[in-house]
Image (cartoon, rainbow, N blue to C red):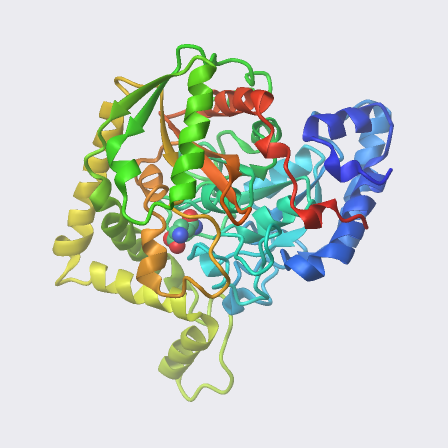
Amino acid sequence: MTDLHRLSIRELAEGLKTAQFSSRELTQHYLNRIAKIDSQVHSFVTISPELALAEADAADGLLKSGMAGLMTGIPLAHKDIFCTKGIKTTAGSKMLDKFISPYDATVVAKGKEAGLVTLGKVNMDEFAMGSTSESSYYETTLNPWALDHVPGGSSGGSAAAVAADLAPIATGTDTGGSIRQPASFCGLTGLKPTYGRVSRFGMIAYASSLDQGGPIARSAEDCAYLMNVIAGHDAKDSTSVNKEADDYVANLNGTSVKGLRIGIPKQYFNVAGLDADVKARVEESLKKLEEMGAILVEIDLNMTEAYVPTYYLIAPAEASSNLSRFDGVRYGYRCENPVDLMDLYKRSRSEGFGPEVQRRILIGTYALSAGYYDAYYVKAQKVRRLIQQDFLKAFESVDVIAAPSAPTTAYKIGASLDPVEMYLGDIYTIAVNLAGLPAINAPVGFDKDNLPVGLQLIGNYWSESQLLSVVHQYQQATDWHSKRAAIAEENA
Ligand code: GLN
């Protein structure tokens, strides 16, 4: 079969169960595509063919014996932020260029238990700090829709791999938009779950109170499959919530779009820098949802102007604390020939971390320093609470909130190097993490340059099933999610 990469997760699962193809054949198919096509996209940092084929053979054994689960034998790519026993975990950093974790992240372990096959690890912004994947220490990942554009970030490798059909599905993490924005830039569906829904154990920390793992895939249905595997309580992560996960696949038709109240925040559609094509496509998608029976309700989210400054104090503050462990002694890169301990610390960190990570450590350390702690960090925490309350108030009158996922489509490579400009591009995604809410990106069309545009739907706590269901129904009625970039049409 030459077109296995066109099948959905449901179709792949069916094909495996009915022995139309084996997991080995499917895995080899993807490995062939990666070998042929990834030299154009650079989505993988590590490809693990031997491990993948061994896992595929084990999955085939389970399939033959009738012991297989919902996703047994289906390949995936993991963002290189999830620790994987036996293969490198770099977090996109020179600091961890040689790091092989002695254990698996819970997300990876759950994938293995479910019989998923790991194709390899995909690229990302260094320590997940960025919106373009350009801050990675490794090769620049390119957007499959236009190879002179970025795939978004920080989970840019995950999005590029799925958009080029080099993996049917990938894991990502979202601290301030890193699942939703690359999904938007690459024409994919990506879900950022409620904080605490997916275990952070073994997921290299950026900003611990904001970080959350989730799926990047073609459709809401595909995302639901992976959510069924990775969601749930984990005793190894004290912030993971002890609440039973839904059956996201069974719930795909569980929410009716008819009568669904969709809040449209006035402030979001007047943001300076919102691209006209993005605005138009998002509005068209909302019109479509209205035709399907949804009720559009104008709402206020008055804290919008505070999102960027609040996030860019809290996230760097937590990052500066989390990254202090990389000192050349306990973890990570160690400089050559240090003259004394101070020299070892300084040079290991200066040489091991890239410029964006160093910038955030400086901002965060400053915000946490004794003289400024109250003025910056404590103040930001108070504003964070107000942002959360703003959302909760909105959810008293609406079921979900609609927004673009990003004010623009994918940037040209090298175009967004001014950090402040890049930070402003996070306006639509970061408040969701500050409030701990779930949100999803769905592709809803293209701009004048044929670059994908994404709609974001934000839900109340634990409403992942509802978000997936609404997008699933939208995707039954439209076909934006099944559009493929030219490079994905190439056969290996
Ligand atoms: N672009 C945001 C940042 O750089 C979000 C990154 C993320 O979600 N990991 O912080």
From the viewer's perspective, is 245 left or right of 318?
Answer: right
Q: Position of residue 490 (x, y in %)?
A: 76, 49
In the image, residue 223 sits, relative to residue 359, either above or below, namely above
- Quadrant of the rendered structure where residue 289 is? top left
Residue drawn at x 27%, y 49% is 308
Q: Picture quarter containing residue 358?
A: bottom left
Q: Is residue 335 above or below residue 36?
A: below
State the residue at coordinates (68%, 48%).
486
The answer to whether 65 appears left or right of 279 in the picture is: right
Nearest the eye: 44 or 257: 257
Task: Quarter of the image for the N terminus: give it.
Answer: top right
- Pinpoint residue 302: horizontal percent, then vertical percent: 19, 35
State the count of labels: 0
Counting from the top left corner in percent of width and height, residue 360 is at 33, 62
Residue 286 in view: yes
Could you say where residue 296 lies in the image, as x and y percent from the top left? 34, 20
Q: Residue furthest front?
A: 448
Report the residue at 49% width, 44% height from top. 447
Using the image, determine if residue 41 lies above or below residue 470.
Answer: below
Tell me, yes or no, if residue 81 can be seen here. Answer: no
